[in-house]
Image: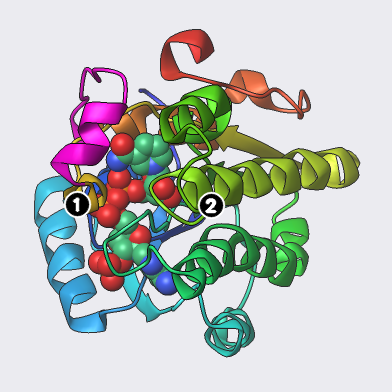
Amino acid sequence: AGVDLTGRRAIVTGASSGIGVQTAQALAAAGAEVTLAVRDVSAGQRTAEEIGTVTGNRLIRVAPLDLSDQRSVAAFVTAWEGPLHILVNNAGVSATPETRTPEGWELQFATNHLGHFALATGLHRALLAAGRSRVVSLSSIAHVQAPMVFEDVNFRARPYDRLLAYGESKTATALFAVEANRRWAEDGITVNVANPGAVATNLGRHLTEEDYAQLPAFDFKTPEQGAATSVLLATWPRLEGLGGRYFEDCEEAV
Ligand code: NDP
């Protein structure tokens, strides 16, 4: 709160739903020029309108991006012009009845890990051009609390069942972010990982009652609360130059 992002340019991936919308809205409210990187451009335009109305910020743009498709990521990167101050690599996909297959495992890795990786590295030049810039990658409590994932599937399920593939892909997300931070910090690019707990968004709609029965009882946050860590990591002045700080939860960060 209180951060002035006027003149700063931000990208939020997955800004068509849940945490991404709230993150984009908070950055827009602080005055940033925000690009909503979404799969469904017309839905993104509606979101941009809403954010514009709520925040009074008219510098909201929409650009097509399918993170699971490397050609789409490359096209997005090619189309991006000028410096980039904030990249929130937020888009992600979890286990769905349809993705409980080897192909679904690949989809989760392609989106949650390879997509984040390709986008951040593709935009490295733009992040560098900003002078000081921030990347936030959304990992998950499913990475931090890996035992939760393992114990609950008891290793009896096939590895792509339930949340194991999700937890693995999110661990890859986090490891990439930590390594990118190590390499890029001296260039003024701070990379951090946000690991929200359970947030009431579309993500959870794919989990079945059986899944929930195997998981700890979650205290669900609102999407706005879920976005708090991303917004903090994208904007917090105290992070400047610190790099490498790894926040496991919003409460820890503040
Ligand atoms: P939602 O399902 O509400 O939003 C996910 C967003 O990611 C949507 O905008 C979706 O776009 C987008 N997305 C999915 N696949 C792709 C793709 N291939 N290319 C581009 N965009 C894509 O979930 P959340 O808001 O909860 O999730 C945001 C992030 O937070 C995710 O990375 C998630 O893993 C992480 N997270 C969420 C938690 C939770 O409890 N909700 C807990 C911990 C982490 P579309 O609208 O087109 O489907």
Give neighbour class at mark 1: few <14, some 14-19, many 20+ (Cα, 10 Å).
few
Residues tagged 1 and 2 counted as in contact (Cβ below 8 A): no
Between residue 147 and residue 172, name the one nearer to us.
Answer: 147
Left or right position of 157 against 239: left
Left or right position of 93 against 18: right
Local secondary structure at mark 1: helix
Point 75% across, 50% down: residue:
131
Point 25% across, 20% down: residue:
218
119 versus 163 height, above or below: below
Dot 1 beta carbon under 8 Å from ligand 1: yes
Give neighbour class at mark 2: few <14, some 14-19, many 20+ (Cα, 10 Å).
some
Return the residue at label 2: 159
Point 71% across, 72% down: residue:
122
75 versus 66 height, above or below: below
Corner quadrant of residue 121 = bottom right
Magenta residues, start to end: 208-223
Corner quadrant of residue 34 = bottom left
